[in-house]
Image (cartoon, helix red, strand yellow):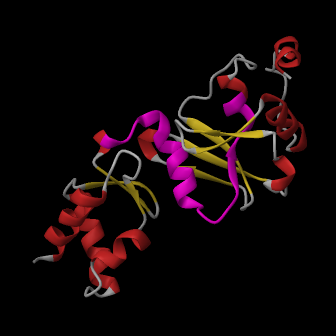
Amino acid sequence: MQPLRQLMSALRQLATPQACLFTPADLRPLLPDQTDAAFKTLLSRVVRDGLMTRICRGLYLYDPSLAAPSQLLMRAAIKLRPLDFNYLSLETVLSDAGVISQIPMNRIMVMSSGRSSLIRCGAWGTIEYVHTQQTASSLAGKLHYDTDHQCWRASVAQALKDMRSTHRKTDLIDWNLAHELV
């Protein structure tokens, strides 16, 4: 079987609404006989032919209809840093709770044990990783698991603490509402 057909056949079997994002490392075992150069060329061809969509460097989306746009960025954030401790916080959590007046459009803020960086994901938006030295054990009870986005999410109190510790602007925060929720 040709490598392109072999890859697409495997993806049709593997992809689900919860697992539609793939890194080259995820896809490489599907074509073990290909050289690295041939594999990279094949990935470029798959994107060029519209069979997969490149979200950002090192991340590909198979069948956009499987992914809910609101969940795609968070799943991408987790997929890009699978070995780091990541959780939604800062303006993303405060906006969802109605504590800040502006809604960050197509942008999520993720506290991460990895380094701070901005990852642009084209039409889907931007992932902003903000470094934290806090550990999962030190945040027990301050985070909850968001089943919709399949990630950890800070409480409003923790998001406010993260805002202060990262020296972010707090002028948009409705402090009366924030104190009610904390």
- Count every numbered label the image shows and give the total: 0
Q: What stretch is highlighted in magenta?
A: 66-93
Q: Is residue 76 magenta?
A: yes
Q: Residue lying furthest left in this view?
A: 1
Question: Residue at horizontal 37%, vertical 41%?
Answer: 67
Q: Work out whether residue 85 or residue 109 is closer to the camera in this orientation and state it.
A: 85
Q: Which residue is drawn at 84% across and 58% down?
A: 133
- Asked whether residue 174 is drawn in magenta, I would say no
| Front one among 68 and 130 | 68
Residue 162's place in the image compared with 180, above or below, is below
State the quadrant of the C terminus. Answer: top right
In the rendered structure, the answer to whether residue 55 lies left or right of residue 1 reads right
Compared with 86, 168 (above or below) is above
Q: Quadrant of the N terminus?
A: bottom left
Q: Where is residue 60 in the image (x, y as percent from the top left)?
A: 38, 58
Locate residue 132 relative to residue 83 in the image: left or right: right
Give the percent coordinates (x, y) of residue 120. 53, 49
Q: Where is residue 6 in the image (x, y as percent from the top left)?
A: 17, 71
Q: Which residue is drawn at 67% across and 20% down?
A: 102
Task: Return the residue found at the far front.
Answer: 141
Left or right of 10 on screen, residue 74: right
Q: Main secondary structure of the magenta part?
A: helix
Residue 158 location (% of width, % of height): 83, 36
Quadrant in which residue 48 is drawn: bottom left
